[in-house]
Every structure is written in structure tokens, then in C-alpha cells.
Image (tube, rainbow, N blue to C red):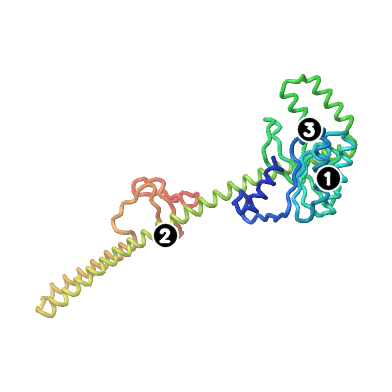
């Protein structure tokens, strides 16, 4: 799966096609692609599976260079494991000298240990759900992984007695280095689980921050809307006041007003001024309701009305209820 995905995306990239990848991802440009994936057995050419693989590998070794992408499935398989492992190590070293970029899969334990020891090669594996016995299709660098043959056999109905014997044989055949690699892999897997949980927590925190930012934006827009409405009503009152003042001045010019009429006109102007000031304070006779956003003057913070008890309002302010 991983080999075919890498090969396909590399070819799509060089054809100018969009590929699924993270922002900022970088891809190489290759002059040659080599792949040995699947069974190359041929009856017409009298080739076994192993011989067919060897012919493909020989062509790769002859032509691969620093501008080549080499994909090899089950490197060294199809023959005696000890010889297959040795041949695979030599092939990887040869391709390293040719500076080719190589992705190879294997089930050989010694080849996995070889990758741990080398400074130019590293392990990677696809995570496996041990409970569901299904692949997760998540590639993890630094972890060689296991085949899960015994777990799959048990899930398919093999007896517990047989599975236990197989595990005993497996444990007896593991070398000290194999045990260390297995222990290291388990540690890496535990850390990977922790990292995934941390990633989930970070994602949840990011969503909460986005929701909070959206709420703050809505509050700010509401404040601006309320202020705009207040400014409009105040401007209207001022216009009315100016009109009344002008009318009063015209009367003063045209008529000799009596003292009580002057006092009445003055009172009218003062009344308009008081209404304007009152509007600035509380937006006039607006009836507040649950869910409205208001500014708490004592803190100069915006909160949301959560409950109304007679003339008292309970305001939710950053998680605190104020009366």
C-alpha cells in the first residue's frame, strides 16, 4: 500500500497533477522510477518468483542513480531467510552508494535490526489495530512493526493451544538483539499513542479557541451595532433640539415673548438635553431579555443576560454570574 502510494504520488507530481499532501510538503523530481512489486513468476521464461525478483533487482543496480526512486516489495524474499537477509543488506548498501532514494518492505527481523544500526537507513511501519486486527493506514517513522501472524491466526479460529506453542517457539528463537528491538518498538508504540492523544487534545483546544474567537467577534459586532443605534438616536434628538432652538430663536426675533414663555422654552430645551443624556446611558426604554448582550459598567466587560428576576438581571460574564 505505502509503496504504491508513494510511486503514484511521485508520478502525479511530475505530471503536474495535484496530490493530497500537507501544506509545505516538498517532493523530489526523479529521472527514473524502478519498482519490484508483486509476483514476477514466468513459466514461459522458466523463472521462479525469486529469480524474477533478482532480474529486476539487477536492472535497478545497473541503472539507478541519485535521481532515481526505487520501490522494492519484500526485498530478499522467496529463498532461504538467512541468505535472503544477507542479499538484501548488500543490495541496500549498493543502492546507497548509488545515492538512490529507496523504499523497501520486509518481514525479516535481521533486516529490521540492520536498519536500526545503519546511519543512512531507517525503519517505518504501518500501524495495526491489534483489537480489530485491521490496518490503520498510518505510517510511523522509526518503528519497524510486526506481522501479527499469530494474532491473525487466533482470530481465524486456530486453537489457543496451538497459538501458545507458536509463541513459545517464537520466544525461544529470538536473539538478545531481537528482544531489544522488540522492547524498543513497544516503547516507540507507547510514545506514538501518547502523541496521538496529545494531538487530539491540541485539536480540541484549537476548536475551542476558534469558537471563543468567534464569540468575541460576535460580541464586538453587537457592541458596534448597539453603539451605532445609540448614535443614530442621539443624532436624531440633537437634530430635533437644534430645530426647536431655531424655532425658539425665530419666535424671539419676531415676537416679544413674555417671561413665562421664555422659561417654558428653556425647560423644553433642557428636557431634550436630559433625554439625550439618558439615551446615552441606557438606550432609552429598551426592554432587555434573556440572551441579550450587555456591558457591565462596574467592570466595563460584555456579558450575556442568563436570567431576569423582577428588576434584577443575572449576567453571565466569562463564566461568572453577576447580579
Left or right of 133? Residue 220 is left
Which image quadrant is residue 105 in? top right
Report x, y in % for residue 45: 80, 35
**The one of 319 and 122 positioned closer to us in this rendering:** 122
Looking at the rendered structure, the secondary structure element under dot 2 is loop
Mark 2, other Cα within 10 Å: few <14 / some 14–19 / many ≥20: few
Which image quadrant is residue 4 in? top right
Report x, y in % for residue 317: 47, 52
Mark 1, other Cα within 10 Å: few <14 / some 14–19 / many ≥20: few
Residue 14 visible in the shown view: yes
Q: Earlier in the sequence, mark 2 or mark 1?
A: 1
Residue pictured at 20% horizontal, 71% vertical: 243
- Which residue is denoted by mark 3 in the rendering? 44
Q: How many marks?
A: 3
Pick the quarter of the image with the N terminus. Answer: top right
Left or right of 140? Residue 236 is left
Residue pictured at 86% horizontal, 50% vertical: 94
- Which residue is denoted by mark 1 in the rendering? 58
Left or right of 262? Residue 195 is right
Report x, y in % for residue 289: 35, 48
Q: Earlier in the sequence, mark 3 or mark 1?
A: 3
**The one of 2 and 265 positioned closer to us in this rendering:** 2
Looking at the rendered structure, the secondary structure element under dot 3 is loop
Tell me, for residue 297, which label it has, or none.
2
Q: Residue furthest front?
A: 44
Mark 3, other Cα within 10 Å: few <14 / some 14–19 / many ≥20: few
Amino acid at each position: 500500500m505505502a509503496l504504491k502510494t508513494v510511486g503514484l504520488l511521485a508520478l502525479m507530481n511530475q505530471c503536474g497533477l495535484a496530490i493530497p499532501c500537507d501544506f509545505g510538503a516538498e517532493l523530489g523530481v526523479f529521472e527514473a522510477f524502478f519498482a519490484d512489486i508483486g509476483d514476477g513468476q514466468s513459466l514461459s521464461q522458466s523463472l521462479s518468483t525469486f529469480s524474477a525478483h533478482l532480474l529486476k533487482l539487477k536492472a535497478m543496480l545497473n541503472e539507478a542513480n541519485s535521481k532515481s526512486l526505487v520501490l522494492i516489495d519484500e526485498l530478499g524474499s522467496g529463498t532461504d531467510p538467512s541468505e535472503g537477509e544477507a542479499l538484501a543488506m548488500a543490495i541496500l548498501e549498493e543502492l546507497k552508494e548509488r545515492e538512490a532514494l529507496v523504499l523497501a518492505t520486509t518481514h525479516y527481523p535481521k533486516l529490521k535490526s540492520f536498519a536500526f544500526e545503519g546511519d543512512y537507513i531507517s525503519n517505518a511501519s504501518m500501524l495495526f489495530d491489534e483489537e480489530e486486527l485491521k490496518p490503520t493506514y498510518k505510517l510511523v517513522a522509526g518503528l519497524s512493526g510486526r506481522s501479527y501472524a499469530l494474532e491473525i491466526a487466533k482470530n481465524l479460529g486456530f486453537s489457543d493451544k496451538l497459538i501458545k506453542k507458536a509463541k513459545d517457539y517464537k520466544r525461544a528463537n529470538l536473539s538478545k538483539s531481537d528482544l531489544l528491538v522488540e522492547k524498543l518498538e513497544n516503547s516507540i508504540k507507547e510514545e506514538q499513542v501518547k502523541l496521538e492523544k496529545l494531538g487530539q487534545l491540541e485539536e480540541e483546544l484549537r476548536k475551542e479557541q476558534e469558537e471563543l474567537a468567534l464569540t468575541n467577534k460576535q460580541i464586538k459586532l453587537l457592541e458596534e451595532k448597539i453603539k451605532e443605534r445609540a448614535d443614530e438616536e442621539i443624532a436624531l434628538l440633537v437634530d430635533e433640539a437644534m430645530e426647536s432652538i431655531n424655532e425658539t430663536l425665530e419666535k424671539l426675533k419676531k415676537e416679544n415673548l413674555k417671561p413665562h414663555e421664555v422659561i417654558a422654552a428653556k425647560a423644553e430645551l433642557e428636557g431634550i438635553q436630559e433625554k439625550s443624556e439618558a439615551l446615552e446611558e441606557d438606550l432609552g426604554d429598551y426592554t432587555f431579555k434573556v440572551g441579550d448582550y450587555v456591558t457591565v459598567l462596574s467592570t466595563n466587560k460584555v456579558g450575556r443576560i442568563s436570567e431576569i428576576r423582577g428588576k434584577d438581571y443575572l449576567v453571565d460574564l466569562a463564566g461568572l454570574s453577576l447580579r
